[in-house]
Image (cartoon, rainbow, N blue to C red):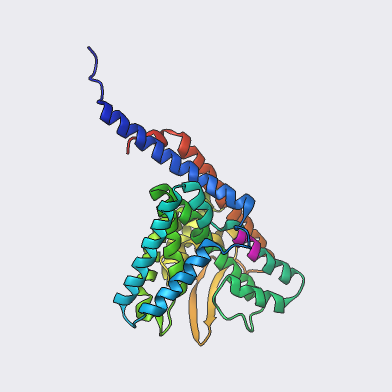
Amino acid sequence: MGPPRPSRARLTLVTTGRATLRGRALGAAVGIGADAVLGEPTPRLPHPVAAFGSAMGAVERRIYRDSRLAGAAHGALGVVAGAAAGAALRSTALATYVAVAQRELCRTATEVHDALAAGDLELARLLLPALVGRDPAGLDGNEIARAVIESVAENCVDAVVAPALWAVAAGPSGALAYRAVNTLDAMVGHRSPRYARFGWASARLDDVANFVPARATAALVVVVRPRSAAAVWRAVRRQARAHPSPNAGVVEAAFAAALGVRLGGTNRYGERVEERPVLGSGRQPEGADIRRAVGLTRQVTAALAALLVAVAGSRIGRREQ
């Protein structure tokens, strides 16, 4: 008689689960590819992430209190708004395209590289705030290069790997909820008298949301730079934990080791000064290393997209959920 046949309801559930998982993986890959080809949406229209930031800035002005509770409410509203926007889009590919910003990241970093290559230190200082929050005044070429490489490494997680992985995990709502968390962290998650308590919840949410993506990014660095695998492993294992961020330290250490440079040092943020730990064991970064960091980010992005396509067509994508 053979084994009993599964019920029609079970077949429907399995088929739906397969299509959902495979569709999310493929959609995230398509979104990454669209960003690489098209870049940011047309400048004549406000970028959705910028519009979200403006809206949450207005909410902050209405509900701000110097308390963690008020900050948690602000963060919760932002995450719900991001998830709702993703649900309204109903397209993992489109949501990933909105959430990912690899091409813009690489373009901005390359502009700083070109300014340094032309010997225009003042222009490089003017361009730097588009990437980092530290004070560019007085930074020489090597320190500007270090700042850019650290930003490129961290944003390889924030602007590429994390939104794509959250899209695979939870579809369009996951991609835009993640982008909401990351935007809120940039707005209120930094350490300052105003946001020490109000921004606490957003900063912790960002730490949680990036925990797996940061380590996945380090693994992808090993995939695209196998000759540096041992150095990357040592740097991540021995040095990353000294960084104040549980995630930025991991990916910055991986980039430093893969590029053969040394990151970390003194960072100035207005009146605040932070001493960051040394990451990597190579030489001091130079302007030309910015282009190498951009190239590494593009390789990581391509490897991630290829992996997602493979998942969409593999037995992983056909497994029951």
Query: Is residue 302 shown left or right of residue 4?
Result: right
Q: Residue pushed farthest right?
A: 118
Q: Residue pushed farthest bottom?
A: 271
User: Where is 96 relative to 194, above or below?
Assistant: above
Residue at 50 percent across and 57 percent down: it is 99
Residue 101 placement (x, y as % from top left): 56, 58
Residue at 66 percent across and 79 percent down: it is 140
Query: Is residue 281 shown left or right of residue 320?
Result: right
Which quadrant: the C terminus?
top left
Which quadrant: the N terminus?
top left
Asked whether 56 or 127 is in front, the reply is 56
Residue at 58 percent across and 52 percent down: it is 35
Number of marks in picture: 0
Residue 288 placement (x, y as % from top left): 69, 65
Write the start and end of the magenta stretch as one range.
Answer: 104-109
Is 297 covered by the magenta stretch?
no
**Picture quadrant where residue 72 is located:** bottom left
Asked whether 266 or 32 is in front, the reply is 32
**Can residue 219 be seen?**
no
Residue 284 placement (x, y as % from top left): 62, 70
